[in-house]
Image (spheres, rainbow, N blue to C red):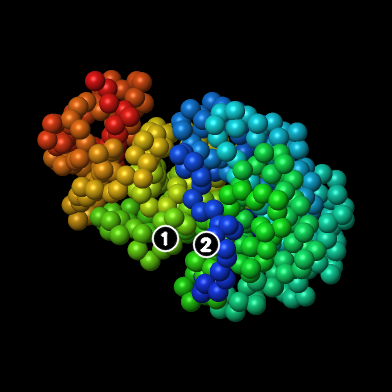
Amino acid sequence: MQHRSRLLGATSAGVLAAAGLATFAPSQSQATPPGDKTVTATMFERPYADVGKACAGELGPAGYGYVQVSPATEHIQGDQWWTSYQPVSYQLAGRLGDRASFKSMVDACHQAGVKVIADAVINHMAAGAGTGTGGTQYGKYEYPGYFQDADFHTCRTSINDYTNRDNVQNCELVGLADLDTGSDAVRTTIAAYLDDLRSLGVDGFRIDAAKHMAADDVAAIKGKMSDPGFWVSEVIHGGGEAVQPDEYTGIGDVDEFRYGGHLKSAFQGGNIAQLKSVADGKLGSGSARTFVDNWDTERGGSTLTYKDGATYALANVFMLASPYGSPNVYSGYEWSDKDAGPPSGASGWTNTHTQQAVTGLVGFRNEVGAAELTDWWDNGGSALAFGRGDKGFVALNNGDGELTQTFTTSLPGGTYCNVAKASPDSCDGSTVTVGDDGKIETTLPARSALALHTGAKTG
């Protein structure tokens, strides 16, 4: 079963799945973020003004193609992070900023060469009654100017059977008012909200709780938009469930939750060699958005998190270096209380998106492009290495001790900067020599990485 911690503070346990029933015309689908820079940074619960600054000073210079921001709607009041996922209107009046600050952020990100993905909460509205963050008075099933009782599904009980498609998609996710997305009027209102965000410059959407809407409904909403942009649906896989992620691949990309679980099993189980088959049993690479963790999984325990230190960094290196999927780097904040909201100042953020092991591999991915995976090596346990044609090479040591090894690569001979450790413009002490025969003789310290690419030759 799926219990969304972000919604009411319950523990996230995983979930979604089942058969592909819907098919869509190719014009409906735009899978894999368009452009040469395909890495996304999710700046979870960051104020929009701060995201704009990060685009200019961090994300753009590092080569990120996209930034995903937390929901831009008026929502219920409260300090908990999950209040952002209980909208009461589609005004841009949440705790992260107003309409003007949102627009300024989009403009700043575009100027820095970074496109913006908005997290869109369109499956449901809030669970209770009160006054929203923008002053709207609301009640459950009554959201002035947007929706009233007839706009919601008639199942007014919480989801309790994930093997039952009707229960999953027409009943209430942890008590939240479930919109009847099969209604043309509801679809029109949602599409107008998304079109409004597009008018502010948003380039695409992450569709929250997409599993809880029929794929046909999601496609119909997208079809009502004048220019929908890039879409990625949140569909958590759950074995034996009635709704499966591949139902949504005709609409756009889908978040591949099995990926993060696989990384955790490999890196904590002492056998990262198994990652040679990381794509097996998952969505096709062109439809999958990969991530080491997100705000739900880090709180639910199904993936690695920032608390795993060097191992977490290595998992991010692998994700960014591997050709499978479109990577999404999660950058949140430190927490001990799972419900705690974001920091109010500059401290307390993990800043994963700025760490050298991550930014260096963003540049690596941009440089290697679609180059095929080559020169795989592993020791059957805690270490692996592989190339990306003649463009790049990466090696990971997740062991407790040093690894001394001669690697065979397809790289041209020369001196390279290890971008997992240092920036190419400041690489003293972090260079590696590749022989004319493509071989590298090196020693990797415990829980460290080597990443070389042809855009970071130093000689």
Looking at the image, residue 65 sits to the left or right of residue 446; the answer is right
- Front residue of 217 and 137: 217
**Circles 2 and 1 in contact, beta carbons < 8 Å:** yes
Answer with the quarter of the image where residue 129 lies: bottom right
> Where residue 390 sits in the image (x, y, percent)?
25, 39
Q: Which residue corresponds to the image point at 69% horizontal and 73% vertical from the top-left?
A: 170
Q: Earlier in the sequence, mark 2 or mark 1?
A: 2
Name the image quarter holding the C terminus.
top left
Mark 2 element type: loop
Distance Cα–Cα, label 2 vs label 1: 9 Å
Looking at the image, residue 187 sits to the left or right of residue 398; the answer is right
> Where residue 125 sits in the image (x, y, percent)?
75, 59
Give, as a three-letter code, the residue at label 1.
Gly
- Which residue in the structure is indicated by mark 1? 284
Looking at the image, residue 81 sits to the left or right of residue 439; the answer is right
Answer whether residue 79 is visible to the viewer in this image.
Answer: no
Name the image quarter holding the N terminus.
bottom right
- Which residue in the structure is indicated by mark 2? 249
